[in-house]
Image (tube, rainbow, N blue to C red):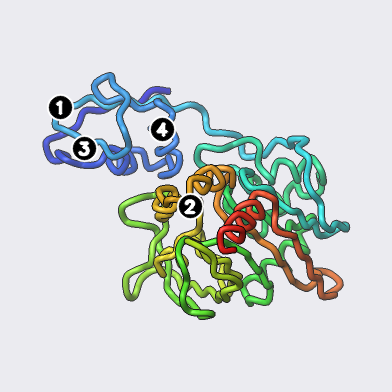
Amino acid sequence: MTWEAAVSATDRGARLDQWLATRLPGLSRSRIKALVEGGRVRVQGRVPKAAHRLKPGERVEVDIPPAPREELAPEPIPLQVVFEDEDVLVVDKPAGMVTHPGAGRSTGTLAAAALAHAPTVAGVGGPRRPGIVHRLDKGTSGLIVLAKSQRAYDALTRQLVRRTVTRRYLCLVQGVLQPSSGVIDKPLARDERSRVRMAIARAGRGRRAVTRFRVLERLPEATFVECTLETGRTHQLRVHLSSLGHPLLGDRTYGARAADRRPDPALPDLIAGLGGVALHAAGLTFDHPVTGAPLEFASPLPNRIERLLSHLRTRAG
């Protein structure tokens, strides 16, 4: 269907995406964003950006395709399975794979691959996120646990809420991080200036987020760090480390561009070769959701980060 309307004088200067959100309450903000980015929104016949400031009299047209079906289609994508039984599936996710469908990405996801690998995950959790208990960002590699049964999903979710699941990460951050260890306890909220970013929340706002870190090695222009999550907020590690002035190498969303301009001529190509950010979920510990037995898994540092680390160590002499 096609929806259209004219901009009134009282809406002068309004952002296009925000204006559409008030007039199309049946569509989520993420769906509106996808429509704009997909060229399905036109202002005066032209394809605008989401931040376009409207003028009185402008004609806005929106081509709204049918909503995607709720059920996720299985996709036979190979998975690196670390552990599996009738209730639990632990996977070592590669960088570049999205955990579940979202704005701008509906295929090639870990959820779709898991559905093909273990059809019993269908109906566990949400229809578009079958089996997904927690998530890893697209650019992050490493260990993630999925539930193959509803009883496992409920039990693992409770463990996450109680913070009894241990998630250990290895990463390379820009610059030389001086404290040898510490705790970052800063609340997070959606960045008021960008729908795709998170930010440190103002006092009294946001959700509490806690990250523990320990320096493993200081190298030229970078630091090798181990982090443990006490909470699991969206982009938590990326925002917390950036708030210290040490964003992850390869993380252009939170300010790591400066590393590309350093005098080391090999560094930009190595960072580009990460295929994401220099962040790897290396350790995962939880109690089996049915038997209660303690389970502990480890994943070695992938070549994409190992190459960068080896180069920095060579430079350090």
Name the amino acid type tagged 4.
Glu
Circle 1 residue: 57
Between marks 4 and 2 in the image, the one whose residue lies nearer the viewer: 2
Between marks 1 and 3 in the image, the one whose residue lies nearer the viewer: 3
Find out whether the residues at labels 2 and 1 contact each other: C-beta distance under 8 Å. no
Question: Which residue is more in the foreground, 166 or 58?
Answer: 166
Circle 3 residue: 53
Q: Is residue 122 above or below residue 278?
A: above
Q: Residue at x 42, y 71 (%)?
A: 187
Dot 4 or dot 2: first in sequence order is: 4
Specify whether residue 233 is in view. no
Circle 2 residue: 251
Mark 1 → mark 4, Cα distance in angstroms: 23 Å
Name the amino acid type tagged 2.
Asp
From this viewpoint, which residue is outermost toward the left?
9
Name the amino acid type tagged 3.
Arg
Q: Secondary structure at mark 4?
A: helix
Q: Residue at x 63, y 54 (%)?
A: 305
Q: Residue at x 75, y 58 (%)?
A: 147
Between marks 1 and 4 in the image, the one whose residue lies nearer the viewer: 4
Residue 18 horizontal/vertical position (percent): 30, 44
Residue 30 horizontal/vertical position (percent): 44, 43
Circle 4 residue: 37
Task: Residue 134: name its quadrant.
Answer: bottom right
Q: The C terminus lies in which quarter of the figure?
A: bottom right
Mark 2 → mark 1, Cα distance in angstroms: 41 Å
Specify whether residue 84 is in view. yes
